[in-house]
Image (spheres, rainbow, N blue to C red):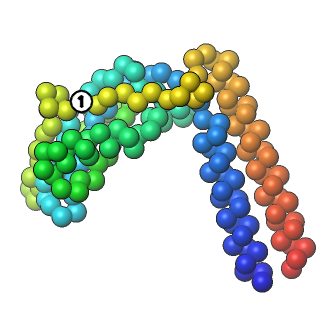
Amino acid sequence: MRLRYFFLSIVAIVSLFIGATDAHAAYKPTPGYIFGFAASFNDSTVYFTEIQRIDSTWTDARKDFLYRRNDYSSQLREHLKQDGFVNPTCVTIFSGDRKKVEKKYLKLRKKYTQKGNFDVKYVTLNTFSYHAIIPDESEMVTTKNDIKKARKAEIKAEKENAKKKKALDKEHKKKK
């Protein structure tokens, strides 16, 4: 019986945190640099895209995390599938600073070219380029005041989640 309450409280806490992080995210327009990497577990071929500048990327206003990064990876995946690369696993790397992206690019490329076990191929800008993904109007932030409001709402949600967690813990202790 105790074990069931324990697992239920864990599920409730996790679902509260997941809901709070996405519900109060606010995004701002940020020019940035992006590149993609693709590999397959069935093949020794890896692909690198060129570093691309995108003027209309959107990032989390507080954490500078790229909005819907998985959709950027999906763009690369679909392109490679059309070219015949079966089951690619794609990763998109982003930063607002070109030097940071170049450093990550060179480190990753060095890792796969030095070993010699991989067939490294490059996807040029002529054949593939990322398209910006724009958030809904309700998710956009354009002023510092809006960013502050979004952060306050996020803090408030975190405090409410902490109160709910305490209440669950108290209830759990009473039942013991």
Vertical side of 55 occupied by 105: above or below? below
In this view, the residue in front, 99 or 83, is: 83
Q: Identify the residue shown where x is 78% and y is 83%.
A: 1
Q: Identify the residue shown where x is 44% and y is 35%.
A: 66
In this view, the residue in front, 21 or 136, is: 136
Vertical side of 30 occupied by 157: above or below? below
In this view, the residue in front, 127 or 164, is: 127
Mark 1 residue type? Ser
Vertical side of 3 occupied by 33: above or below? above
Residue 57 is left or right of residue 60, and the answer is left
Farthest right residue in view:
174
Res. 110 visible in picture: no
* Residue wearing tag 1: 129
Q: Quadrant of residue 122?
A: top left
In this view, the residue in front, 104 or 133, is: 133
The residue tagged with tag 1: helix, strand or loop? loop
Q: Quadrant of residue 140?
A: top right
